[in-house]
């Protein structure tokens, strides 16, 4: 599984977001692997309408619908055909009580929650809430090119074992600093089922070639 986070990069906005998503769709079909795209919120309808891979939000609030000005509601995600949502990225932290409510509401709406944890204690607390997916992503490694699967290898191993003990059904991912196919291979060797990638894809000189190399790791 590959999750591509477009963050708020101008290079991954509007028509550029669609172009990137089309590349992801092409690689997903060619190699028969799951690739999820998390675009900026206003780009969600454009991508849902024009690509045939799952689109996930970068955030959702603990509200269904109603008088919640400025909130991203589950009803809105459902109406727009969104598959799931990231939650608790280190750039958009959420209190554990709110995460619990979000996961509870998500099950009612059939929206998959891709939760993230910055450390093992947070990972343990979130795993007990049973999100669809949980990713270990140390914030100090984000966008550094220093992959968690290499520079925090022992902690990644502990993360995988921890989540497996609590709930083996949770899809285990990792992110932060994932730059090339060797980083991905190392992550999979530790027992994760996929990776989150952002800047390495968005700013790659040849985005198709980059994603293709990553995809090949999953079928080798």
Image: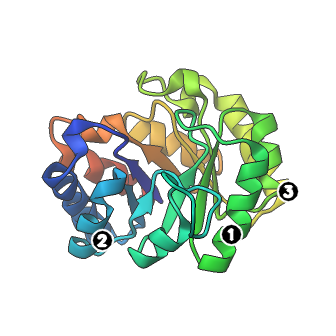
- Residue 170 in view: no
Please report the residue visible at 55 percent of the width from the left and 68 percent of the height from the top.
74
Considering the numbered disc 3 on the image, is that residue within a helix, a strand or a loop?
Answer: helix
90 lies above or below 70: above
193 lies above or below 107: above
Point out the frontmost of discs 1 and 3: 1
Q: CA distance from mark 2 to mark 1?
A: 22 Å
Pointer 1 and pointer 3: residues touching (CB < 8 Å)? no
Q: Along the horizontal axis of the image, is 103 left or right of 20?
A: right
Q: Earlier in the sequence, mark 1 or mark 3?
A: 1
- Residue 53 in view: yes
Mark 3 is surrounded, within 10 Å at the Cα level, by few (under 14), some (14 to 19) or many (20 or more) other residues, namely some
Pointer 2 and pointer 1: residues touching (CB < 8 Å)? no
Please report the residue visible at 43 percent of the width from the left and 37 percent of the height from the top.
182
For the residue pair 74 and 180, the one nearer the viewer reads as: 74
> Which numbered marker is on residue 134?
none
Percent across and percent down for residue 126 are 76, 50
Q: Along the horizontal axis of the image, is 210 left or right of 219?
A: left
Q: Along the horizontal axis of the image, is 172 left or right of 209?
A: right
Q: CA distance from mark 1 to mark 3?
A: 21 Å
Percent across and percent down for residue 28 are 31, 66
Which residue position holds label 3? 166
Point out the frontmost of discs 2 and 1: 1
> Which numbered marker is on residue 105?
1
For the residue pair 24 and 61, the one nearer the viewer reads as: 61
Mark 1 is surrounded, within 10 Å at the Cα level, by few (under 14), some (14 to 19) or many (20 or more) other residues, namely some
């Amino acid at each position: 599984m590959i999750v591509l986070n477009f963050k708020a990069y101008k290079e991954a906005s509007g028509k550029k977001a669609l172009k990137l998503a089309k590349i992801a769709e092409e690689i997903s079909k060619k190699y028969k692997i799951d690739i999820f795209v998390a675009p900026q919120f206003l780009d969600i309808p454009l991508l849902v309408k024009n690509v045939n891979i799952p689109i996930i939000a970068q955030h959702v609030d603990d509200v269904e619908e109603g008088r919640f000005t400025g909130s991203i509601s589950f009803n809105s995600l459902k109406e727009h055909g969104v598959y799931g949502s990231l939650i608790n990225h280190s750039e958009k932290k959420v209190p554990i009580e709110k995460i619990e409510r979000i996961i509870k509401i998500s099950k009612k709406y059939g929206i998959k929650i891709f939760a993230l944890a910055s450390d093992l204690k947070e990972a343990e607390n979130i795993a007990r809430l049973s999100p669809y997916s949980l990713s270990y992503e140390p914030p100090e490694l984000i966008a550094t090119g220093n992959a968690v699967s290499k520079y925090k290898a022992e902690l990644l191993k502990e993360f995988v074992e921890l989540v497996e003990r609590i709930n083996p059904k949770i899809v285990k991912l990792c992110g932060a600093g994932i730059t090339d196919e060797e980083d991905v291979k190392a992550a999979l060797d530790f027992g994760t089922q996929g990776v989150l990638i952002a800047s390495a894809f968005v700013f790659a000189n040849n985005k198709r070639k980059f994603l293709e190399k990553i995809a090949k790791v999953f079928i080798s």
